[in-house]
Image: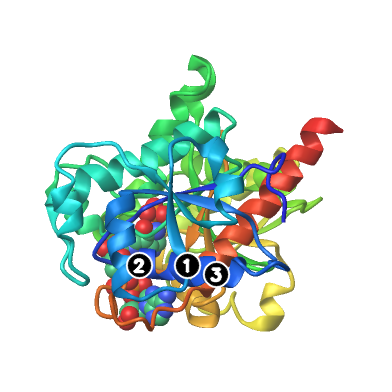
Amino acid sequence: MAVRGGLPLAVSMGEPAGIGTEILFKIYEALRTPDRQGPAFFLIDDPARVAKLARSASLPFQITTITAPAEAASAFKEGLPVLQVAGHGLTALMDAEPGKPSAATAPFVIASIGQAVRHTMKGEAGAVVTLPIQKSVLQEADFPHPGHTEYLEALGREYLPAEEAANARAVMMLAAGSFRTVPATVHQPLSQVPAALSTEKIVAKAQVLAADLQSRLGVARPRIAVSGLNPHAGEDGHLGTEEKDVIVPAIEALRAQGIDAFGPFPADTMFHEEARRAYDAALCMYHDQALIPIKTLAFHDAVNVTLGLPFIRTSPDHGTGLDIAGKGVARPDSTFAAMRMAAQMAAIEQRQQTS
Ligand SMILES: NC(=O)C1=CN([C@@H]2O[C@H](COP(=O)(O)OP(=O)(O)OC[C@H]3O[C@@H](n4cnc5c(N)ncnc54)[C@H](O)[C@@H]3O)[C@@H](O)[C@H]2O)C=CC1
Ligand SMILES: NCC(=O)COP(=O)(O)O
């Protein structure tokens, strides 16, 4: 599959003690056949570390060091292309042990994400695909963002004109085919969610969602079902008032702007099969409300997409899988789906730019 003018995907390394690299090995092995059905990519990591892992797993292919993304497409035919991640003290990476993350590797994990974004924004890569990070370890290393979504929002702002940058909002979306869920608040402790919700925030997230469903995913007239926050969507104010005070005004504002938003719906009944036919995306109020249904129904198929960025970013829906790292049992499906989705989005973007 061609990616934006044949450009390969830039894959950030994620947690070196997690399942990301072994998953990438499985995907490369599946893709290196002559009739491969998937996009070319390059990994931003330490080639020596990746080669050591490949040797210990007796893989039937080689790791190819590249010095620039432009080499990735042809290198992909010879071996899994790896571009050096920036940073000092590479022994910390070489010493990474499956299942045992260390804050010493955090600077490389963070640098790899930044490099993937830079190459994509420079037009050297078609999209960013991130392998999972161990968020607690990055926090220990004083990473000031709770996850990729927030970091990518900050990185994306650097590429936007000042006025646009001030209003830029990254939106987390989990997607498995036409089943899509979006949390209005993202990595927020549950106790802080009610205070963090506002009519403005819900409106801003829904605007990005509607715009990107149209422009990046080809949904002509996005239908957005909005969840309540409380049991039974507040039971007409008897079980909470956020619906009346915050969510309904947001839906009204969105409808006045021509966005087909409706609700609020009780979150316990809006995800069953028939209910899902009525909408293209569910805008939920908090992380687990959005992620539990989709990970329960489609754990190995779902993709995490960040909308509202000046570049395309996808990721598997799962995390670092420390409990299974190094055992060879991690399934590559979600990361593979993330790569295919990034390639499809890049192709849509390219068609729009050339039409
Ligand atoms: N995009 C990202 O960077 C993400 C990072 N995380 C981070 O990952 C870390 C671990 O999070 P958890 O909640 O434990 O979730 P997890 O997804 O890493 O693991 C949950 C369960 O699913 C299994 N699992 C995960 N991926 C699998 C795969 N590909 N094949 C087979 N089984 C798989 C694991 O073995 C574990 O039993 C946390 O630090 C979290 O913040 C979590 C989600 C996304
Ligand atoms: N549970 C999803 C998740 O934590 C992914 O977050 P992000 O790192 O993509 O922001």
Mark 2 vs 1, N-terminal side = 2
Q: Quadrant of residue 224?
A: bottom right
Residue at (14, 52) in percent of width and height:
92
- Are circles 2 and 1 on residues that touch, CB within 8 Å? yes
The residue under label 2 is which amino acid type? Ala
Q: Quadrant of residue 238?
A: bottom left
**Label disc, if present, on residue 61 of the rendered structure:** 1
The residue under label 1 is which amino acid type? Phe
The residue under label 3 is which amino acid type? Ala
**Label disc, if present, on residue 54 of the rendered structure:** 2
Local SS, label 3: loop
Whether residue 182 is situated above or below residue 166 in the rendered picture? below
Q: Position of residue 100 (x, y in %)?
A: 15, 68
Q: Position of residue 188 (x, y in %)?
A: 30, 54
Which mark is nearer the camera, 1 or 3? Answer: 1
Q: Quadrant of residue 153?
A: top left
Residue at (50, 64) in percent of width and height:
228
Q: Residue furthest right?
A: 355
Residue at (29, 43) in percent of width and height:
110
The Cα atoms of the two marked residues, 1 and 3, are separated by 28 Å
**Label disc, if present, on residue 296 of the rendered structure:** none
Return the residue nearer the eye: 247 or 161. Answer: 161
- Are circles 1 and 3 on residues that touch, CB within 8 Å? no
Return the residue nearer the eye: 252 or 132. Answer: 132
Quadrant assignment for ligand 1:
bottom left
The answer to whether one can see residue 255 in this image is no
Q: Residue furthest top?
A: 162
**Label disc, if present, on residue 302 of the rendered structure:** 3
Mark 1 Cα within 10 Å, few/some/many (few <14, many 20+)?
Answer: some
Mark 3 vs 2, N-terminal side = 2
Q: Position of residue 202 (x, y in %)?
A: 51, 46
